[in-house]
Image: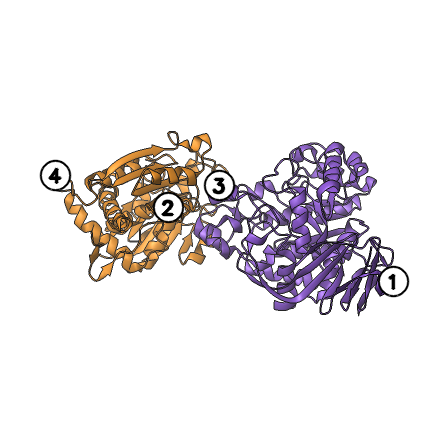
Chain colours: A orange, B purple
Amino acid sequence: MNGPQTGGMRWQRKDLLGMRELSAEEITFVLDTANAFKEVGTRDVKKVPALRGKTLVNFFVEPSTRTRTSFELAATRLSADVINISASTSSLTKGETLKDTAKILEANQADIIVLRHSSAGAAQFLAERLRSSVINAGDGAHEHPTQALLDLYTIRQHRGAIAGLHVAIVGDILFSRVARSNIFALLKLGARVTLVGPSTLVPRAFEQLGVAVSHRIDEVLPTVDVVNLLRIQHERQRKEYFPGIGEYIRLFGLTKARAKLLKPDCLIMHPGPINRGVEIDSDLADGVQSVILDQVTNGLAVRMAVLYLCGGIAAR
Amino acid sequence: MKTIIRGGRIIDPTNKRDEVAELMISDGRIVSGIEDRDAQIIDATGLIVAPGLIDIHVHLREPGFSWKETIESGARAAAAGGFTTVVCMPNTSPVADSPSTIAWIKDRAAEVACVNVLPSGAISKGLAGEELAPIGSLAQAGVVAITDDGHCVQNNELMRRAVEYARMVGVPVLDHCQDYNLVGNGVVHEGYWSTLLGLPGWPAAGEEAIVARNILLAELCDHHIHCQHISSAGSVRLLREARSRGVKISGEVCPHHIALTDESIQNFDTNYKMNPPLRSERDVAALLEGIAYGTLDILASDHAPHAKFEKEVEFDQAPFGIVGLETELGLFIDLLVHKTKTIALPRLIELFTLNPARLLKLDAGTLANGAVADVTLIDPALEWTVNADNFETLSCNTPFTGRKLKGRAVRTIVRGETVWAL
């Protein structure tokens, strides 16, 4: 393979670690590449030989079903061989370090390692030490680049372009890698971003990243073209951050009443898994403005593009 | 054995000396009037002749963690950095919270250490912050201070009793200032970079809350509390106000907190992970101001060796700390004297001799006639490049490899004997 190339641009990265390191041109290039793979999913035979003979390891140190499945399907459609390793089946639970586990995977000649890990910087840590291609599938509260790419892809699919749009990201921003990757990517492509949520989960420090911060969702909703709702995880050690689910819904939940404030063509997005009736009303999640299932389908195409591009570099 | 150090500029703040003169040593003590023909001559032309430098904050890792450092290797690192006296922290295994552990450290140091190693003892049993360590027995065993360094007594009432008790037995209290609730699982300064990178933030208020607590307790108990490794502008402001009222409170500065900012963490390199964390430019400016105006009057390394395999892990899982003994003096001369001109060299030597000796009531840090001949020769203009491969310490966890510095110790003399020379 001669290195993926279209429109005068050549992809140079063996790893995808985050959106912050990508240029606007590179982001657009991935999205354009995903277009080609989207079509593969509509065929009767949903498989191309792009990564035939390559081995992909889904290395999920933190549990995930949705992202892991999406990467597995994407790799399978590219004809790669896939193995899945989770924290409970890896030697990390026996005290082996991340570095040693990864070296073992490389010694077993894994070409691509997809890493999900609870520590920020874990993907970069591996990428600096391995020849294999490393794809970040979420590192702590740092980045989740393929989620941002599929979000951008979905917005572009429905609105044609990203530049000039106003996007609200609502919920637990402080602990969210999805939020950070979306912020970096949306700003690079010329969108305006407003973060909405309780002051404890959306601290003012985020304004330094170039976004607006609001704690009044009713003022924001009429002005946005996209509202991206993040999962609220009150059950996981977040008890001191807000008083309870009931109050969260009252102040920030996308209820039917609030949805009336939205522009008619405003897209409703959610990275999943959804808490129906918490961050979003159940009917709205299934409603005409919701593109939540498009996000899932587009995730496959975007991940195929990422694996194809980075896997192609690692092979050379 | 007689030695004459000739041609150097003697700077001895304890005795208010700053002059080019000869320094004479006989049988391990400073003397006057010995003849050339009896003596070894050390040419110190162009060098500073200072009292042996004192670092009151080092981790020598023994007993218990000898793969990181030993009393022997840590003492060699101290000598190579120009230090003749170091105070080692009690977070060993077992914790230095009993007279027998203190006795072991002292015996071991007497056997293998080429510099003076003075132990500190724990404030609380096991550093757990729940009950007092036997502070009186520790004082009798020879600790020069008590501290729970690495930990921090959270219970203000227990801390009050510790300070009152320490006053009775005459040992100062050193405190690592960290409010556990405010800091939580924080690993880097809470600010722009923690927000950008999604790393748990360690807010400056987590240090300042305990500095404020210590000011109140120092007043209440009328006893000295020394705040270790001060890192934030707010702490400097609190200390300045308290000291202006005569409160028995002080603070020290580590080189990394003025040499680096939190911007350095952006590549998740764990050699930039320390506790307290690297902070903002505004905090660095406040620390420099605190040094310039005397609010912060002791310099220390917080030498914290960790093995490579321990540091080479995910950022939030790596241990805090860096080695510091062999870069400390160079960094401080380079930054404080040459680059920022915050203080002149005599004042810098005061912060390494007179002030720590006075805080811990040490018989050290002086070149008076009859004093033990602990001497450091410093070349303040020597340019060199840090290279961890050349370190004496067993560990190499430093962010300063490759950094060019101006100024370093070139000879370290303990009890009249040269224990290290460049």
Residues indicated by labels 1 and 4 sit on the same polypeptide chain: no
Query: How far, Cα to Cα, is label 1 from label 4?
Result: 98 Å
Query: How far, Cα to Cα, is label 2 from label 1?
Result: 65 Å
Q: Are marks 4 and 3 in contact (CB under 8 Å)?
A: no
Q: Which mark is residue A241?
A: 3
Residue A132: image location, x then y, percent:
33, 45
Instruction: Assign a secondary structure to mark 4.
Output: loop
Tag 1 residue: B34
Look at label 4 and name its amino acid. Answer: Val
Front label number (3 vs 1): 1
Look at label 1 and name its amino acid. Answer: Ile
Q: Residues within 10 Å of mark 4 (few under 14, many from 20)?
A: few
Q: Residues within 10 Å of mark 1 (few under 14, many from 20)?
A: some
Residue B360: image location, x then y, percent:
78, 48
Residue drawn at (61%, 54%) of the image? B232
What chain letter is assigned to the residue under label 1? B
Tag 4 residue: A45
Residues indicated by labels 3 and 1 sit on the same polypeptide chain: no
Front label number (2 vs 1): 1
Instruction: Assign a secondary structure to mark 3.
Output: loop
Quadrant position of residue B73: top right
Q: Which is more toward the observer, B326 or A6?
A: B326
Residue A31 vs residue B64: left or right? Answer: left
